[in-house]
Every structure is written in C-alpha cells, then in structure tokens.
Image (cartoon, rainbow, N blue to C red):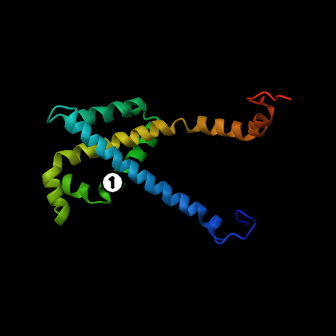
Amino acid sequence: MAGKQGTPDPNPFGVFFAPLRFAIWLVLTCFGLALLSLVMQLAVAKLAWPPGQGQDKMHALAQAEALHLGMADNAMSYRIGRHLAESVYALEFRATGLHRVVVEQRPLPVISKLAANFGTEIRIAMTGTWLVGFRLASAAGILWLVAMVWLAGLTDGPCLSGCLPSPLPVVT
C-alpha cells in the first residue's frame, strides 16, 4: 500500500486493524451516549419534574414507549425493544452492581454508599434505561429503509455523479 508520495506505508497492518479500531470506537461512542443519556434523564427528573414524581413519570414514559412498539400485541418490535432494553440495562446496572444494591438490597462496599445517597436518582435512571432501549428499537425499525436507500445509492451512485449537470456553466 502506497503512502502520499508513492512511498510504502509505514504501517502495513493499518488496513488489517481498521475493523478493530472501528469496533472500539463504536463501543466507546455507545458507552458515551449511554452516559450522556443517564445524565440527561437525571437532569430532567431533578429540574423539570416536581420533586418525588420522577420515578412515576419515567415509568409512564417507558410504558407509553412499550405500548407504541406493540406491547399489547406482543409484536416483534416489542420483543426486540425488550431485548435491547434488557441489554442496555445489563450493561449499565447489572455489570456495575447497582442492580444488586438498589433492587435486591445486597450490600456492596462502595456502591452501597452511593445508592444510599442517590437511591431515587438511580431508580429513575434504571427506568430511563428501559426507555432508551425501547427508543433504540423504534430507531432500529427503520433500518430496512436505510438499507434500501443505501443499496439504491450504491447501485445508482456512479451514474448520478456523471449524469448531473455541472453547477457552473462553462464559459469559452
């Protein structure tokens, strides 16, 4: 593989490790978005909703989103949403031990103090995580459309670049 001036690329394994770098970038991005989502949920629960109603309002939002996905009919979109929600919940709360401390009331040294100080906020974030999972399923529901547009662009793309008129007229 050649460099910019035709010299050999100093990193011949760059192409080989590109998918791994992309996977790591994707995981870190998803983790950052999940943390941002948690911070936003807690901010809304503390600043926008009346005190003491955060858990109830977040639960109502999660139920409404589940009904939107077809919970009453046990639709495939609901099953996918439930699976995504459980996966996000497992990554954020089961893996960190917060689920054991807050829900199962099992003491863990550092996390128990955190749960004692921020128990309400953690419960709101737990319910909000289900909401995020259901909304991810709603967004995943349009992936077939994205794939069709991508396929059309892939097959028709080279023709469009040569068939479109030039934006500026050529003056001779």
Check the picture and name the quadrant holding the N terminus. bottom right
Q: Residue at x 74, y 38 (%)?
A: 157
Q: Is residue 121 left or right of residue 4?
A: left
Q: Is disc 1 placed on a helix, strand or loop?
A: helix
Residue type at mark 1 is Glu
- Relative to 14, residue 26 above or below: above
Q: Quadrant of residue 152?
A: top right
The residue pinned by badge 1 equals 92
Q: Quadrant of residue 112?
A: bottom left
In this rendered view, identify the residue nearer to me: 105 or 142. 142
Q: Is residue 21 visible?
A: yes
Place of residue 84 in the rendered image (x, y in percent of width and height, measured from the top left): 42, 46
Q: Looking at the image, which residue is at 77% across and 30% down?
A: 164
Left or right of residue 6, residue 19 in this image: left
Residue 126, position as x, y percentages in the image: 27, 46
Q: Residue at x 54, y 35 (%)?
A: 142
